[in-house]
């Protein structure tokens, strides 16, 4: 992953303005386009967005008949933590990204999110991990 894409993701996660230029970026750099390029070659991905209510974790994937997904968000606060599991059928979408799941998290916690998809035969199609 290039440093520019990493900087754009860190800016989005930390609540900084996503469209602000990072040091060393050329004029006209578009972080949204950089993120789109990051997701383009993957059959699934997780996007993070800071909102006034917390951090929105959104799972996206491509679906064919019989596909399934599982997103596991592990949240750690203080001396404890827990897993939130969301899973189900992937809506039919062909090669178009479709919303699989989303969850709003407290921004005061550390978390990791893992998304996996499988085809109708149970073969893995995609694995994606995010850690904040």
Image: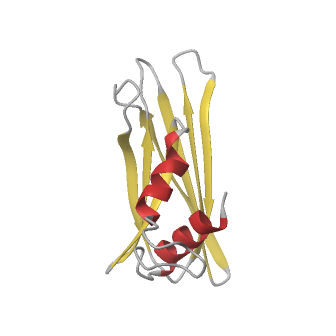
- The quadrant of the picture occupied by the C terminus is bottom right
Q: Is residue 18 left or right of residue 79?
A: left
User: Residue 103: x, y in percent?
Assistant: 40, 60
Residue at position x 51%, y 77% from top?
11
Residue 17 in sight here: yes
Instruction: Look at the image and name its color scheme.
Output: secondary structure
- The quadrant of the picture occupied by the N terminus is bottom right
Q: Is residue 65 left or right of residue 14?
A: left
Residue 75 in sight here: no
User: Residue 74: x, y in percent?
Assistant: 60, 62
Residue at position x 50%, y 74% from top?
13
Image quarter of residue 10:
bottom right
Q: Which residue is farthest front?
A: 27
Image position of 56 with respect to 92: above or below? below
Total marks placed: 0
Residue at position x 42%, y 74% from top?
18
Residue at position x 52%, y 72% from top?
26
Q: Is residue 52 left or right of residue 26?
A: left
Image position of 15 with respect to 84: above or below? below
Residue 125 vs residue 109, the one in the foreground:
125
User: Residue 77: x, y in percent?
Assistant: 60, 79
User: Residue 59: x, y in percent?
Assistant: 44, 49
């Amino acid at each position: 992953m290039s440093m520019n894409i990493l900087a754009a993701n860190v800016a989005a996660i930390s609540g900084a303005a996503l469209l602000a230029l990072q040091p060393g970026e050329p004029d006209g750099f578009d972080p949204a386009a950089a993120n789109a390029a990051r997701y383009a070659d993957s059959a699934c991905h997780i996007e993070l967005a800071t909102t006034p209510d917390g951090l929105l974790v959104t799972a996206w994937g491509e679906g064919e008949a019989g596909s399934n997904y599982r997103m596991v968000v592990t949240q750690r606060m203080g001396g404890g933590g827990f897993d939130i599991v969301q899973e189900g059928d992937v809506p039919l979408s062909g090669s178009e990204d479709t919303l699989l799941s989303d969850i709003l998290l407290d921004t005061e916690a550390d978390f990791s999110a893992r998304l996996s998809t499988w085809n109708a035969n149970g073969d893995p199609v995609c694995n994606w991990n995010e850690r904040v």
